[in-house]
Image (cartoon, coloured by chain):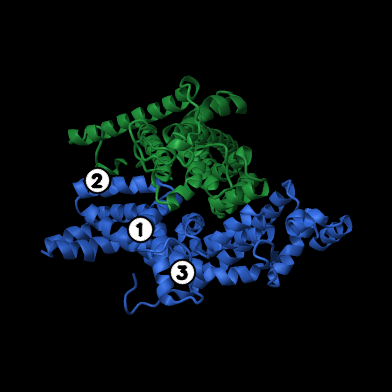
Chain colours: A blue, B green
Amino acid sequence: MTHPGRKLPWGPMARMAGRRTLFAAPVLLVVTFGVFAVAAASPFDPVKAYAGTAGLTASQENLDQLRVNLGVDQPLVERWWNWLTSAVAGDLGDSSVMRQPVTDVITERLGWSVLLAVTAFLVAILLGTSLGVLAARRQGGWLDRAVSSAAYTLEAAPAFWLGLLAMWFFALRLGVLPAGGLTDTDSEVVTFGQVATHLVLPAAVLGVSQLPWFFLYVRQGVADALEEDPVRGARARGLDERTVLLGHALRSGMLPMLTLVGSRVPELITGALLVETVFSWPGIAAATVQAATSVDFPLLAALTVLATAAVLAGNLLSDLLYGLADPRVGFDG
Amino acid sequence: MAELAPKTAGWRSHGRTRRSTRTVRVRTSAVVVAAVLLAVLVVPPLANLDQQAVDLSMKLRPPSLAHPFGTDDVGRDLLLRCVYGLRVSLLVGLVAALAATIIGTAVGAAAAAFGGWTDRVVMRLVDTFSSVPHLLLGIFVVAMFRPGVWPVIVSVALTHWLSTARIVRSEVLSLRSRPYIDAAVSGGASRWRVAVRHLLPGVLPQAGLAAVLMVPHAMWHESALSFLGLGLPTHQASLGNLVQSARGSLLAGDWWPTLFPGLLLIVPTLAIAGLAGAWRERINPRRRSELML
């Protein structure tokens, strides 16, 4: 990608990042407003949700007081603005399902989600690349056909279903891996070994659910590269097939895939929502589902905005990498 | 899936075997889709069987000749439950895909037709909402409107029209610059006539293709929402609900109530993708087909 002596174009990259950040602000504003508009249109009463079962016995005055405290009677725009200004100051409200501030929920859980997502991405990239190269080496051969068919099938399979079957097979049938959670139930402390064994199944399932896309990209990229001049030149110079495949075809074939990794963030979030729920992984995606089932609006709103920000950051990352990998593209977008 | 064939392959390419694999694939897909439709449309009204028939003496029997998919934890026949589940999921998917296609076509065509500021604002909004992961947006909508059939349909439709709007917009823009449109305009055709008689027929195949490919995606969405407990009410045997209600049996070690509903989601998805791929090659021979999930 970069030659040892070449300097990275920091200036243009920083300008692009700055422009995109400016662009992200209105997007996030619109999304937050949309979130509040949907909530305003919904038949759901935040006061009853906040009070929970206590709301059944509470007096009318108490409920009215709560209504004022929560600011439910204010018009939509005002509520949105209040939320926005306190969000900028670092206060995202209180989560009713977790019974703690939303910012605490996020800081406690974000790390676990990132750990899961990064491991899954590594699984998908490593497996996808090796399978892709093997398949591209002999296009239309039995291995290519078998793996490609499997990839299409896998792409159609819901991640939660894969997760459940993996849990059944590895945790119940073979009994080699834990079925869910972060640590054993009787354990008080979080140790590295426990987290590692509990991470294997969810990360593998999330990785495998992202695998088809990586595999198909590498396969196509390497197959295309095998037809191009550098490969023909390398073969003409008498380099052995292994060097041609890994040194030449894979290098140019993997580039488009690596640069698009950032744009896979939405699929990763979708997968995480399902996989974290199946394996009770204490991450942020599982918290989103919990927030949704118990209509915890402050938590749900914050996590929706956070996910949107992650998607925008992923897009920026992929455009930066693309500009680096292919100087013709540049950093103007 | 045609990228199995070399890129240079024209209609007269060498490789009889290649063409026949493709034919086999398209025919298999057609048979599967037909079988699914038949099962879903004919079995419930004709077969005088009660999918809710509880038989506790037959609970959690593994697949056998009498019960090809086995029975669930209260002894209901899973094959029958799955057919009903597929029926519900397919219906939700169809309605959601249809709604999304109508919204997407209208928005995309309007953006292309008005151009200028309208176009820019509308397409910016489309970009903005594309930045929210679909399932998350769906979860949010359903959470705010309580789980149920209509919230699920609305949430799937609301998240899926964006891509159709983009496709239709670019198609209208490319059609509009063709000479035959100029000819129609200079021939004195009204705007309406140009839109309905000349632009619409050019856009419909692309929009239709997007709609067909959207059906399995919408079914996938419905089952994911139902699985998370945010979808259809539990008495509606959708495929996602079947997987969700099988969790208890799975933890007890019985795999079949989980396996079969998932397979019934995968097989029609692949078949529809196979048919849509053939259709795409026909209306757009240069573009490679892919699963588009």
Is there a contact, CB below 8 Å, between mark 1 and mark 2? Answer: no
Residue A298, given in percent of the width and then of the height, sits at: 68, 61
Q: Quadrant of residue A33?
A: bottom right
**What residue does disc 2 label?**
A145
Residue type pointed to by label 3? Asp
**Is label 3 or label 2 in front?**
3
Q: Are marks 3 and 2 on the same chain?
A: yes
Instruction: Estimate the spatial distance between the alpha carbons at disc 3 and disc 1, rounded to whole Å.
Output: 16 Å
**How many residues crowd around disc 2 within 10 Å: few (fewer than 14), some, or many (20 or more)?**
some
- Mark sitting earlier along the chain (3/1): 1
Residue type pointed to by label 2? Arg
Residue A255 or residue A60, whichever sits in front: A60
Question: In the rendered image of this protein, does residue A215 appear above or below residue B12?
Answer: below
**What residue does disc 1 label?**
A170
**Is label 1 or label 2 in front?**
1
Residue A172, given in percent of the width and then of the height, sits at: 38, 57
